[in-house]
Amino acid sequence: MEKSNVYFTDFHTVAFGDGLPAKLKKLIKAAGIGNIDMDGKFVAIKMHFGELGNLSFLRPNYAKAVADVVSELGGQPFLTDCNTLYPGSRKNALEHLRCAWENGFTPLTVGCPILIGDGLKGTDDIEVPVNGGEYIKSAKIGHAIMDADVFISLTHFKGHEATGFGGTIKNIGMGCGSRAGKAAQHNSGIPHIDEELCRGCRRCFRECANDGLEFDAATKKMHVNQDNCMGCGRCLGACNFDAISFTDSSAVYQLNCKMAEYTKAVVDGRPNFHISLVMDVSPNCDCHGENDVPILPNIGMFASFDPLALDQACADACLAASPMPDSQLARNMEQPDFVDHHDHFRNSTPESEWQSCLSHAEKIGLGSRQYNLIRI
């Protein structure tokens, strides 16, 4: 397969020169965003507004830089994301918008409207065929996202407790799914709780949106309700004591494949462009209501027309970097029983796995894992 072009610039700036938003504008223009006909077109810019309490999400300044370029090209941009499956501050459009506003995303700060892609209750979706899909034949995507003429993703590249990292494919595939679409992607495995390791802290209980967990007051232990559990994995990320694991070993593998297929449903058949910023690389997703110290240093900004090549380039850059001292990754590597996976993301969260996502994405024709890195 032919190599895709991935454009890169670091976070260095010159005193009294251009700031990072201006540098981002130069990057995406050099990467060819201007080749997309946006004149009079609706342009969806998919991003993550951050959960309340989390401060590792991308600052609104970067979103405004992208929206400004789209406007310069004659497009009508809007920022968008879909509602979450789990409880938190983004499970319906009203709470989601308030969360976005509190985190600094308003029409005044980003220079364009903000729309929640799957509507008020997360039920406004449309079924989109997945060309070549093995796990998903019809993806449930937020209606407003599919109504857009042009699709752009703006991704914060960071770690993830299940999928290894959260990159472009996760931002698009999981992020553009409606609440029903997210459930369809997650529902491939059921967690198991080891009672000997469970401390009864109930932190996982607060993360469950589907009555999938039950607390036994007598034993002070948590149990999984097999009938209600959707297999979303939020409890896994919430447990600090390694008491939760998946009984279906293919759960993460299937989740990765489904995300790739959902991404293909979103981008197929219309102009699309993708941006990923490797900074504030927290060990877990921005969906968490907190963020730990970064596991890796800030690396730079990447852009490409190929979402798969973009994820591969970002992952390669991260694997070549040195762990941040005293981070979750560094602490894990200092443990006497540490097993080196030669992979920063798996060393940070050994239960996670990301290779299958990129492999399946290439298999279904989403893009290429081979790329030319062009430094700007």
Image (tube, rainbow, N blue to C red):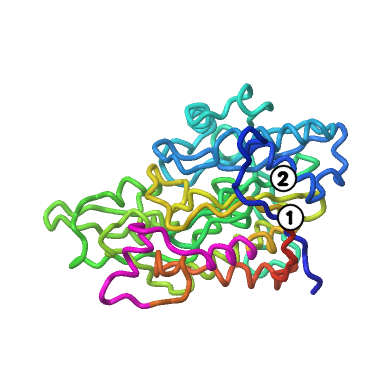
Which image quarter holds the N terminus?
bottom right
The tally of labels here is 2
Task: Name the amino acid type tagged 2.
Answer: Ile
Residue 289 part of the magenta segment = no
* Front-most of residues 297 and 229: 297
Residue 77 picture quarter: top right
Residue lying at the far left in this picture: please name it: 218
Residue 161 % position (x, y): 43, 59
Q: Which residues are magenta?
A: 312-339
Task: Indicate whether 284 appears above or below 206.
Answer: below
- Crowding near the residue tagged with mark 1, few <14, some 14–19, many ≥20 C-alpha atoms within 10 Å: many
* Front-most of residues 69 and 306: 69
Q: Is residue 168 left or right of residue 281?
A: right
Q: Is residue 40 left or right of residue 352?
A: right
Task: Name the amino acid type tagged 1.
Answer: Ser
Pair 2/1: label in front: 1
Of label 2 and label 1, which has the lower sequence position? 2
- Taking the spot 68% from the left edge, 63% from the top edge, the residue there is 308
Residue 146 % position (x, y): 73, 44
Query: Residue under circle 1?
Result: 304
Task: Indicate whether 189 appears above or below 127.
Answer: below
Residue 320 part of the magenta segment = yes
Residue 331 % position (x, y): 31, 63
- Taking the spot 80% from the left edge, 46% from the top edge, the residue there is 33
Which label sits on residue 131? none
Task: Indicate whether 69 appears above or below 297.
Answer: above
* Front-most of residues 295 and 48: 295
Residue 245 picture quarter: bottom left
Query: Residue under circle 2?
Result: 152
Q: Are marks 2 and 1 in contact (CB under 8 Å)?
A: no
Q: Is residue 276 left or right of residue 128?
A: left
